[in-house]
Image (tube, helix red, strand yellow):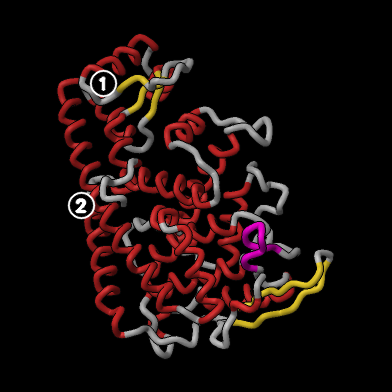
Amino acid sequence: MDHTKFTDNKTGKLLELHGVFGRDWTFVPDSLPPLWSFPAELWPLLDRATSELARLDGAGKHLMNPSLLMHPLQMREAVRSSNLEGTFAEPEAVMLYEMNPRSPKSENDEANDWLEVSNYGRALRQGFEMLRVDEPVSCEMVRQLHKTLMTGVRGKDKQPGEFRTVPVQIDSNARFVPPPADDMIDCLAAFDEALTWNPQELEPPIHPLVWCYLAHYQFETIHPFRDGNGRIGRVLLSLMTYKHMGLQLPWLYMSSYYDRYKDEYKNYLFECSSNGNWSQWIEFCLRGTVTQATDSVRRLDALMALQNEFHNEADAKGQRFHMIVENLFMRPVLTVPEVSKKYGVSWPTAKSDIDALVSTGILEVLPEERKPKVYYAPRIFKIAYEDDPSGE
């Protein structure tokens, strides 16, 4: 790590290391909260970010089954967060994998990618359920979520759910070297205590949304695991935003924004450490909050309109059609055997149901040759997973 990039305004201490690869430097961050005051010029942006987040939460409250339409947002988050780490998987491939999961057969097996994305979604849902039963946000929670994230995937040999006991570096050129294991334990203890605080009761008070982004920086800088730190850090960010902002459900997911501005994301995190540029980092995250909240409201509105349209199409076809349509928003891919088993009907009846949905334009056959034949809802995919023409 190039220690000359760290100025007198750095937010921690540099330690010199001597190891098998020679001399190097590592950074140990100061504990939260930082010695920094929220700048007055960012108040309008913070107000807009909280307003857009409130509008997103309000849109969710008007849904008959809000968790149903949250699932596409979570799958999108899982895909984009994995993209940030170099894992690329299409949503439909992940969904097909989840219908019939299997262990990867080799390091190059595509199932590795699908499982990584699937595990991310599982960790998100696990964390949400833990918070729903009033478990506190803590390092212990993070440790459990990391175990879920890393189970069975590449890196499973890197102690899933266990804090590291060895040095790590960020990027192959050691652009940043997090604290050594011994110092990391002290950093984690301080971080764990900070997670219990109400940021509005600090002196001076810190806005809850700002606090979430300060905590995200702190976690990524400590880098407590041998692998999976970026992904689990973004899971933690979603959960903290849900809790601290008093949302009905964890609606805000930042990975799409961070992935689109990947270089800025990495650089702004580094500059918090190297020269204490907190304002730049917080402004970046608040702009991302506005972007992601606005984008999610648009997607939710479109999904809700499509849901109503699909149910109107199903009105003349009976209750089972309504159930099939409803479940398409959770997972917009299906097969005849799956419908037969799920709804307790014969194979010919299930095929007839799917054919009827194809005739209305709700379903189409997935172009890829598969056995059994796979059907999907292209309009749900378009709304939930395609990028907005404006680039969001």
Q: What SS does tag 1 mark?
A: helix
Tell which circle, 1 or 2, labels the residue nearer the N-terminal end.
2
- Provide residue 145's location: percent of width, then percent of height: 56, 55
Q: Residue at x 50, y 67 (%)?
A: 267
* Residue 77 visible in the current orientation: yes
Q: Residue at x 20, y 25 (%)?
A: 314
The residue under label 2 is 62
Label 1 amino acid? Answer: Leu
The amino acid beneath tag 2 is: His
In this picture, residue 291 sits left or right of residue 238: left
Report helix, strand or loop for mark 2. Answer: loop
Magenta stretch, main secondary structure class: loop
Q: Residues within 10 Å of mark 1 (few under 14, many from 20)?
A: many
Residue 326: x and y, percent? 29, 34
Viewport quadrant of the N terminus: bottom right
Q: Quadrant of residue 162?
A: bottom right
**Residue 269 percent coordinates (x, y):** 51, 69
Q: Is residue 175 magenta?
A: yes
Q: Nearer the viewer, residue 190 or 219?
A: 219
Q: Are marks 1 and 2 in contact (CB under 8 Å)?
A: no
**What residue does disc 1 label?**
357
Pinpoint residue 355: horizontal percent, then vertical percent. 28, 15
Q: Which mark, by number, is residue 84?
A: none
